[in-house]
Image (cartoon, rainbow, N blue to C red):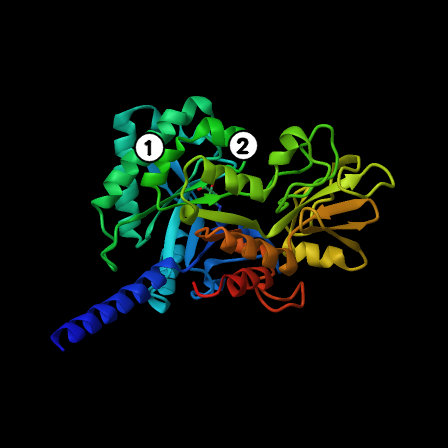
Amino acid sequence: MGATTMDQKCLWAGLVVLLLLQGGCAYKLVCYFTNWSQERHEPGKFTPENIDPFLCSHLIYSFASISNNRVVIKDKNDMMLYQTINNLKTKNPKLKILLSIGGYLFGSKGFHPMVDSSSSRLEFINSVILFLKTHNFDGLDVSWIYPDQKDNTHFAMLIHELAEAFQKNLVKSTQESLLLTAGVSAGRQMIDNSYQIKRLAEELDFINLLSFDFHGSWEKPLVTGHNSPLRKGQLDRGTSSYYNVEYAVGYWIRKGMPAEKVVMGIPMYGRSFTLASAETAVGAPASGPGAAGPITASPGFLAYYEICQFLQGAKITRLQDQQVPYAVKGNQWVGYDDVESIETKVQFLKTLNLGGAVIWSIDMDDFTGKSCNQGPYPLVQAVKRNLGSL
Ligand SMILES: *[C@@H]1O[C@H](CO)[C@@H](O)[C@H](O)[C@H]1NC(C)=O
């Protein structure tokens, strides 16, 4: 009798532990939002007040920068931003909000000379902790785009020293330690040369794998290709075989990053080309980037809300091998993601037990619902629906 009671107690304890673990095992939906999207004109103008506090499990503000070895936000509406962060977290206490440092424009040079000596790194890390605590952020995302081979050691040291310092510093509201993540490359050469993956695996809470920009109008010779194909294309040979999500995810894992720490990138934008001939397939000759979108105004690049407009009267083809769509209208070609390709991608990441999905970026989804007629946030909602519980 006594023994039975004991067993039952253990069983119950086991169940409670299981339930708690399941809570901890839910997939992450990490959403980057950019500070420059507030400057776009309607319907692209996006401010943090537009964010639904229950849409994502993690939000990442992009980007802060470094000045005199200190972290700084040069946002025009920074006071509003800090207020909004606190409001979002009051509405959803489980929501994590991180600050990302770096980005494409900041580049690799922005991290120098800060990373080059231990005293300047210490100065930086102290400023980060003070900043995160003052403004109620839950952690830091290091988006060094990208460390090259000679930065390999300094990148690892920076992460190591940040991780050590973060463990000693708890977030006031939750008493949890500050989160540390990194936005990392999906290029095989970079994965080989820039990252000490086994060390990073121990020190980062997770990586945001930037698994897009595999093809674009920078290619030589200039031919059409998809921004973020899930799988290798039939025509891919040699190094081209690496330019897809499946390969990049697999390679990070093979090199020692635990699957549950890999958060897979899904783009809310496409990359476009101007066709040079009547050929329209993948690998067709192009004469340059596609025409700039009316709102994002950048040649070769279209936000999802611009793609929806482009699709009217366009011919859509689904690539059976790469499992993503592209569309052609006149001499314009764009490879993009939609609800269907996102379903396939999320099923893929669940099969591999990855940590979740990271969205670049929520301000490029049709967040108003006005451009695509699929309701607000059709793509982020598709990711969320297919991930299941967050
Ligand atoms: C966004 O942040 C960058 C880097 O801190 C800054 O240079 C830029 O002016 C900011 N943009 C706006 C609109 O605040």
Question: In this view of the protein, which residue sits in the foreground, 83 or 305?
Answer: 305
Marks 1/2 in contact by CB < 8 Å: the verdict is no
User: In which quadrant is the C terminus drawn?
Assistant: bottom left
Q: Position of residue 339 (x, y in %)?
A: 63, 60
The reply to whether residue 38 is in sight is no
User: In which quadrant is the N terminus drawn?
Assistant: bottom left
Given the current orientation, which residue lies at the most extreme right position? 278
Single out the mark in the foreground, 1 or 2: 2
Could you tell me how far apart the alpha carbons at marks 1 and 2 are, in whole angstroms? 22 Å
Q: Residue at x 64, y 45 (%)?
A: 229
Residue 188 numbered mark, or none: 2
Looking at the rendered structure, the kind of residue marked 2 is: Arg
Q: Residue at x 69, y 54 (%)?
A: 307
Residue indicated by mark 1: 158
The reply to whether residue 256 is in sight is yes
**Figure quadrant of residue 311:** bottom right
Q: Is residue 268 left or right of residue 101?
A: right
Q: Residue at x 27, y 34 (%)?
A: 161
**Figure quadrant of residue 168:** top left
Q: Position of residue 239 (x, y in %)?
A: 63, 29
Instruction: Establish if 358 lies above or below 212.
Output: below
Looking at the rendered structure, the kind of residue marked 1 is: Leu
Q: Position of residue 121 (x, y in %)?
A: 29, 31
Q: Secondary structure at mark 2?
A: helix
Q: Residues within 10 Å of mark 2 (few under 14, many from 20)?
A: some
Instruction: Establish if 314 lies above or below 193.
Output: below
